[in-house]
Image (cartoon, coloured by chain):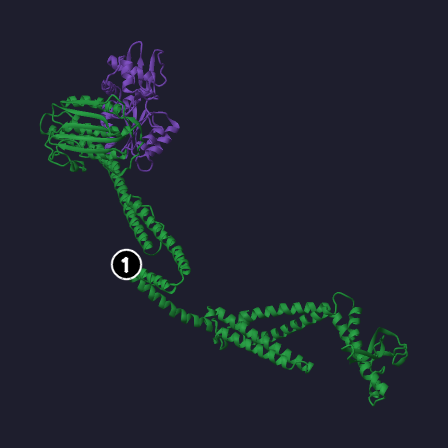
Chain colours: A purple, B green
Amino acid sequence: MYNILICDDEKDIVSALKIYLSSENYNTYEAYTGKEALQIVRNNEIHLILLDIMMPEMDGITAMVKIRETTNIPVILLTAKGEDTDKVLGLNVGADDYITKPFNPVEVLARVKSQLRRYLHLGGGSIKSSSLRIGGIELDDKAKTVTLDGEAVSLTPKEYDILKLFMENPGRVFSPKDIYNRVWKEPSYGSESTVAVHIRHLREKLELDPAEPRYLKVVWGQGYKIERGGES
Amino acid sequence: MNRLTHSFPAKVTAVFLFVISVMVFVSGVIGIYFLSEYDFYESSMESARNNVFEKITRAYANRVYYNYLPAYLNKSHDLQRYANEFSADNTNFLFVIKDEEGKTILSSYENQEVQFSSTYHYEDGDYWYDEAKDSFVYNKTASHTIECYVSKILTANDRYSTAEFWMQFAYSMRYAAIILTAASLIFSIMLFIFLMCSAGRRRGKEDIIPGGIDKIPFDLLLAILFVIGVLEFAVISEIHYTDTFGMVLIIISFLILDVLILLLACMSFAVRYKLGGWWKNTIIWRFLHFNYRILRRILLGIKYLLQHLPLLWQTTLGLAVLSFAEFFIIVITEHNIGILLIIWLLGKLIFIPAILYITINLHQLKIGSQRIAGGDLEYRIDTRRLFWEFKRHGENLNNISAGMSKAVEERLKSERFKTELITNVSHDIKTPLTSIINYVDLLKREEMEEGPIKEYVSVLDRQSARLKKLVEDLVEASKASTGNMVVNSIRTEVGVLLTQAAGEYEERMRDNGLELILNKSEDEIFIMADGRLLWRVFDNLLSNICKYSQPDTRAYLNLEKVNNQAVITFRNISKYPLNITSEELLERFVRGDSSRSTDGSGLGLSIAKSLAELQNGRLDLVIDGDLFKVIITFDAMP
């Protein structure tokens, strides 16, 4: 049983989230202002917080900063602000993830699960010498297996090779032609779009929201890369 | 102080004291002048006394020689009078007259103690005309020597004793005089300031009240004063040397009069100054003012006439005057080519700069109008150097551009405001929308029989998803169209981007029964673009292709370099008849189909166009029957 704090000034949203999280057997706490959230975090053992940004009395960013003074638990921000600058600000003050309203409940659940797994099971877990890890993705080259937040992901051999290429060179941008040459090991002759299709599949398997990838990023007009530190 | 300045007796007293003080000052200055003349400041009393005694002694010697000696020699009846005059009782002057041989002729000196002695020589003789030499010859007849003494103790009351008395007094007073003069000067200045302050003040009145004298024109007043001065001078020069005492009296009284008059003038000036515009009550000013008004009217009249003549008539008139002047000059100088040439040269010296100046003015106007026409609404023509009609024209152009830039600014402001409004409103819409989507989802999860309720829930689900998309598109459209978006343009390979985009969409296309065919040249084509924004352009266009293409057709995606431009073409066959123009399609909220039943906001094309333009690209639509073509053009980079 994990304790999850839901903090939003909109009562209906809190109730809806409570229904979803309860159905997955999470124990929920409710707060409607930043102050209440702080109170609950202080008095209870909370494992994850869903925090709205725009709230009366104390906004989410301020509450976020205060929470980070004492604890390290995962915090997912919920907000109607979709601007890039808002996202960057949220992540910079210590949020672990970011979901924009209106959100898809399934996505919220997936992200909650992912954050909890990483926080509780993988935090500081040992890495096998043969394995590569970026964020929640772990690639074991001996066993030829890939896990995402501890759960096995099944990949085709080409997808596996592409992912391995990225994980061996985190942060580096590969053009479709590069990838084709290295993975297919033959000149591309204009079949780079195959690469794009494969990467699309890879993203669908590894990302909660393929349109907003955390790990496998598209650098439009240049190529693809995996983010060095996982999500940014 | 206020009470004093407003009190009449105080003023009268001040005037009285002022006159006295000035007189003291004047006499002090005169006294100091004489004291320094007699070296009272630089040498001792003795030498000063010698100086004075010398002068007196000579006068006495003269009197002895010219009056007493002849009377003595002739034994005239005046002898007794002179003997009496030069007796020890009446004078301290002692003398011995000797002739050429040194024999004493007459003497009053009996070896008394003396303090001053001096010897004078006198010669008698006459001039007569020597015809042989043709000149006047002087013939000495007699010569005498007079030894003069002044007795040590001045017992008698004569000029010596008087001189001695005054000298003693003056000498003792020589420093006091300076102090007294300075004090009287300071006192005079203080009184003068007081009088200036009190000028025009009356008891019980706050305002400045001009007196009768203050109504006389000031220059007239000065003229009267000047005439009085001249008259005084005439009187003094008339009575000169007749009576010393009387003259001194007259001079002193005139001096007092002058001081009074000058003081009056100064006070009058002070009153006028306090009232302001002291120069207005002068004959000169009135005269000038009156004439200026007339002159000004005439000039203004001419100016008005000229200004209201049409430009053509102004020019014609100017040229006519000029031609007449030229004609006149030619006529009067018909016999003198030299003068004509000089005048012609002078004319050119004036005309060429004038024409150049006009040309420069025209040039400036041209540059200004070009800049303004080119959209630089901040540009202002410098009208300081322009003149005449050019100046007015320049100002008009400036006004146009000012008005336009103001309009543009207001438009931008309202656009920004609109974007802000849309962004804020959409934030507010998103919160309830989140609840709707979540609860519809919860409803969907409930066990439900097949039937109307399930159908209704699915409608809710679809429409809420559409609403979500609509809100997102709305924000993006308003941002893109107002340029309220950060664009990070870098060198981008379009081919790679197209490959990536095609890869993203390949499966969706296949699902919709479409085949995407990508044609691109082998050469890499680079453009300046923000990859993320350009992807959004392609995303919108490809998504449209998926939604609106006739199933089982092919969609073409071409990239080629034409005339140094990267041209990207999207082509597909529309599912619906395109009974609409391309311009209308690009309008916001317009879609090719009129039913509006499918998802999408109708903003996709508009957003794509705005985003392309934000990156300095172009987006054009071509509709050819059912063929729908989007052409995106960017400047290719080397």
Residue B16 visible: yes
- Depth check: B526 or B342 in front? B342
Q: Quadrant of residue B101?
A: bottom right
Residue at the far top: name it. Answer: A142
Q: What number of labels is visible?
A: 1
Q: Residue B269 at what x, y percent from top left? A: 51, 71
Judged left or right of residue B216, residue B475 is left
Tell me which corner region of the image, top left, top right, bottom left or bottom right, holds residue A110: top left
Residue B518 percent coordinates (x, y):
20, 22
Give how far across and how far down residue A29 sits, in percent. Answer: 29, 28
Identify the image quadrant of the N terminus of chain B: bottom right
Secondary structure state at the residue bearing disc 1:
helix
Q: Give the camera-side residue of A135 and B124.
A: B124
Quarter of the rendering containing residue B437? top left
Q: Residue at x 75, y 65 (%)?
A: B42
Looking at the image, which residue is at 35% across and 61% down? B326
Residue type at mark 1 is Leu
How dense is the environment of label 1, judged by Cα within 10 Å: few (below 14), some, or many (20 and up)? few
Q: Is residue B91 found left or right of B356 in the rendered image?
A: right
The image position of residue B441, as x and y in percent, is: 18, 28
**Mark 1, residue position:** B312
Which chain does tag 1 point to?
A: B
| Viewport quadrant of the C terminus of chain B | top left
Q: Is residue B443 visible?
A: no
